[in-house]
Amino acid sequence: MSKELKNALNNEDAQVVSQLVQNDPDDISGASLKNYTLRGLELHDLTITNVDMYNLDLQGAKLTNVTFEDCTLTGVDFSSSEFHNVRFMDTTLEPIGTTRYDVKETTFKNSLLDKVGFGDGSKLLDVLLHSLAKGSSLAIVDCTIEVVVEGHSYVFYDSYLENLLIDRTNVEEGVALSLAIFGAENVIIKNSSLTNVDFYGVQAKNLLIQNNQDTLLRVGGEFENVKIVENNDSRIVLNGAITTVYASDNGGGNSGVSLRGDISKVLVKDGSGLGVSFARGVMKTVEVFNCDNMRYLELKSVVIDELKLITLDAEEINSTETVIKKIIYRKCSVEREQLGRKDYN
């Protein structure tokens, strides 16, 4: 590191640091930066490589077309910042401390994250993406999301997100992904493993949950279109105000799809070894079609205008405290059945 850059860091002169790093990004490569306040840092069109950042106050940063590669960010504060086309690759973002009494997270609170990506083996450990500004879009690909501090806060809270992609990512047990996401166009969770994960308070036009493995995911919110497809050895619990739910080609192990809330139209089809549950809600049209080796179909405390059960092979169908106004029941092989009133068509 050059003497000029060292002096600018020691003086905590964010403007000079910005100019020096912008002119020669290699000057900061391999550096260890600790306990600096550099509010308003501005960088564009460069890559920051192999830099350790510890307890940095970088509030109000403006970064455009910047890539962090093979870096470690520990307790870095990016609050009220503006990012455009920023990537974190093979980078660890983690807190200082391991208990709720001494923790200081790496945070992006109140920031605009426009087309920001985390990828290439990055680790997000107790990262806070709270109160993100309108226009934010995130992609989390080939990452690990973990909790360091037990009972820690939500990853997303009170945030606007136009698009969210989680792909090829392990979300470990204890992570609460969201308590409030607003105004999303597309939320996609695919090719991942989510172990006992909560994802609540999501408001999105489209939700896709596809090809996840060994997953227990609980989702709640408001959606127009939900697709739950090609998941294996996974249990998906969905609760909310939803226009359409389409679940297809799910199965294996202890797989299950549980739907709750106010839902206009449901189609569950082409599953194998599934447990399917409709509970605590009001649903207009529900069709379960062409599912074999079903472990159970359960209806509990639900009102359904029309229920279609067609071409099923199930161990058990049962209902409790349920009102079904019309049932279409065809080509079903069921070992144990308790549906109450039926209309065969």
Image (tube, rainbow, N blue to C red):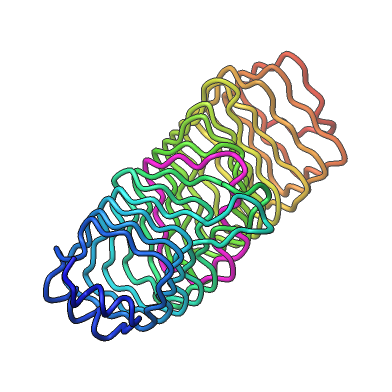
Magenta span includes 179: yes
Relative to 236, residue 185 above or below: below
Q: Residue furthest right?
A: 321
Which quadrant holds the C terminus?
A: top right
Query: Which of 97 and 235 lies nearest the eye of the viewer?
Result: 97
Relative to 172, residue 303 above or below: below
Query: Which of 281 and 105 lies nearest the eye of the viewer?
Result: 105
Magenta span includes 65: no
User: Which residue is found at the position 19% from the left and 62% from the top?
Assistant: 47
User: Which residue is found at the position 75% from the left and 43% from the top?
Assistant: 279
Left or right, 5 with respect to 175, comes to left
Q: Residue furthest left?
A: 23
x then y, percent, for residue 192? 43, 39
Which quadrant holds the N terminus?
A: bottom left
x then y, percent, for residue 225? 50, 56
x then y, percent, for residue 137? 38, 66
What's the magenta region? 156-181
Relative to 49, residue 131 above or below: below
x then y, percent, for residue 187? 45, 57
Q: Residue furthest top?
A: 335
Query: Which of 140 and 273 lies nearest the eye of the viewer?
Result: 140
Left or right, 110 with respect to 265, comes to left
Relative to 182, residue 91 above or below: above
Left or right, 42 with respect to 203, comes to left
User: Which residue is found at the position 62% from the left and 45% from the top?
Assistant: 218
Left or right, 136 with respect to 298, comes to left
- Total count of labels: 0
